[in-house]
Image: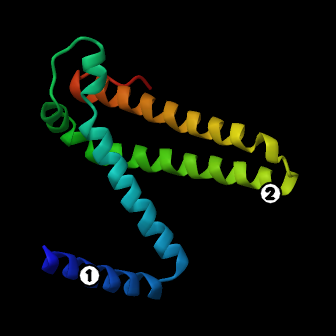
Amino acid sequence: MIAYILIMLVLGQVIIGILQALPPLVIIGIGLMITAFVYTLILRLTAFLPGIAAGKRIGMSEGFSETRALGTQIFIAALLVLLVDMAAGYGVRFVYINLELGASYPYAMLAQQWLTSMLMLSLLTTIYGHGIEGKPLNS
């Protein structure tokens, strides 16, 4: 256990050293890709939840395997949701800093989180309907 902790500490220092040598935009891009990848995993792992809410018997592993073919599309959608969330967050902070509306800041952050939650729920139900139930996407 101690050896594992030491290896992780050394590995962490190496990764930090590598990241510090990169330009800031590259670091932001790497962070966006990692976050979008995590969002993709979460969406694929939770794709069964709308089915359970609708009374269908489906498991996590079945939902994950059913959405395998949609991995790239889910990643792109997760990246877009992440970018919308970031833009809304920067907009909220811009208004807070430049217009000095300190009392309304918590409400603006709440609205931003609500927007992101609704986008993720919409994406999750679309993934379930299209990926698991096989419903076509209307264009």
SS at mark 1 in the image: helix
Return the residue at label 2: 97
SS at mark 2 in the image: helix
Q: Nearer the viewer, residue 126 or 15?
A: 15
**Quadrant including the C terminus:** top left
Q: Residue furthest right?
A: 99
Q: Is residue 9 above or below residue 42?
A: below
Return the residue at label 1: 11
Question: Which coloring applies here?
Answer: rainbow
**Residue shown at the point (31%, 22%) measured from the top left:** 50
Q: Residue furthest front?
A: 2
Give the amino acid at mark 1: Leu
Q: Position of residue 61 (x, y in %)?
A: 13, 35
Number of other residues with Cα within 10 Å of mark 1, as a class: few under 14, some 14 to 19, many 20 or more: few
Are the residues flagged by discs 1 and 2 in contact, CB closer than 8 Å? Answer: no
Q: Position of residue 66 (x, y in %)?
A: 17, 33
Q: Quadrant of residue 98?
A: bottom right
Q: Is residue 88 left or right of residue 31?
A: right
Q: Is residue 17 left or right of residue 102?
A: left
Q: CA distance from mark 1 to mark 2?
A: 38 Å
